[in-house]
Image (spheres, grey):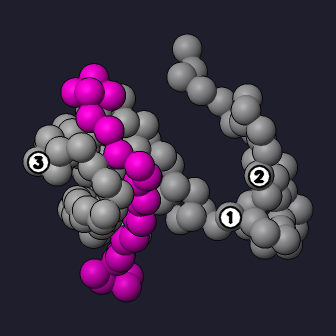
């Protein structure tokens, strides 16, 4: 049984649309379209944040805002996979920095997309705090 399903429609100019049960986005060369690595990094960032937030709420932690930046690189330009990934989490006005750091670390352990990608890439987490 499928966990989830998306549908995609494409033309010969790499212009497309992706439809999920929750909505649609433009992909590829479509105006405002997301490229494959945008969606890949976005999926990782969203999964990580969802998992981190669930853990933070269970730990009764609060903060005003969280920003996530996900980037990656191929160390070898001929490589077929991303080899290094950085997740940068910036948390504004956390109730407890040490416990937020711990929630973020646990988020990497329990995020299924993180676990999948970490099988082929080295993923680093950087947590920053702002007032």
Q: Earlier in the sequence, mark 2 or mark 1?
A: 2
Q: Earlier in the sequence, mark 1 or mark 3?
A: 1
| Gap between marks 2 and 1 measured at Cα | 8 Å
User: What is the secondary structure assignment of the residue under circle 2?
Assistant: strand
| Residue 63 magenta | yes
In the image, which disc is placed on residue 25? Answer: 2
Q: Position of residue 46 (x, y in %)?
A: 48, 46
Confirm or deny contact between disc 2 and disc 1 (CB under 8 A): yes
Please name the residue shown 30% across and 83% down the image.
76
Q: What are the residue bounds of the magenta stretch?
A: 57-79
Query: Farthest residue in the bottom direction?
Result: 77
> In the visual, does 75 lie left or right of 67?
left
Question: Which residue was labeled with disc 1?
Answer: 34
Q: Residues within 10 Å of mark 1 (few under 14, many from 20)?
A: many
Q: Earlier in the sequence, mark 2 or mark 3?
A: 2
| Residue 121 magenta | no
- Quarter containing the N terminus: top right
Confirm or deny contact between disc 2 and disc 3 (CB under 8 A): no
Question: Which residue was labeled with disc 3?
Answer: 98
């Amino acid at each position: 049984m499928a966990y989830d399903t998306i549908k995609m429609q494409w033309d010969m100019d790499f212009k497309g649309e992706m439809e999920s049960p929750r909505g649609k986005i433009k992909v590829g060369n479509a105006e405002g379209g997301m490229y494959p690595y945008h969606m890949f990094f976005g999926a990782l960032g969203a999964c990580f944040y969802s998992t981190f937030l669930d853990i933070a709420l269970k730990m009764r932690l609060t903060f005003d805002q969280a920003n996530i930046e996900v980037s990656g690189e191929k160390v070898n330009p001929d490589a077929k996979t991303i080899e290094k990934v950085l997740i940068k989490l910036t948390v504004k006005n956390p109730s407890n920095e040490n416990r937020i750091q711990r929630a973020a670390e646990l988020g990497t352990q329990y995020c299924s997309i993180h676990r999948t990608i970490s099988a082929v890439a080295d993923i680093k987490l950087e947590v920053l705090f702002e007032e």
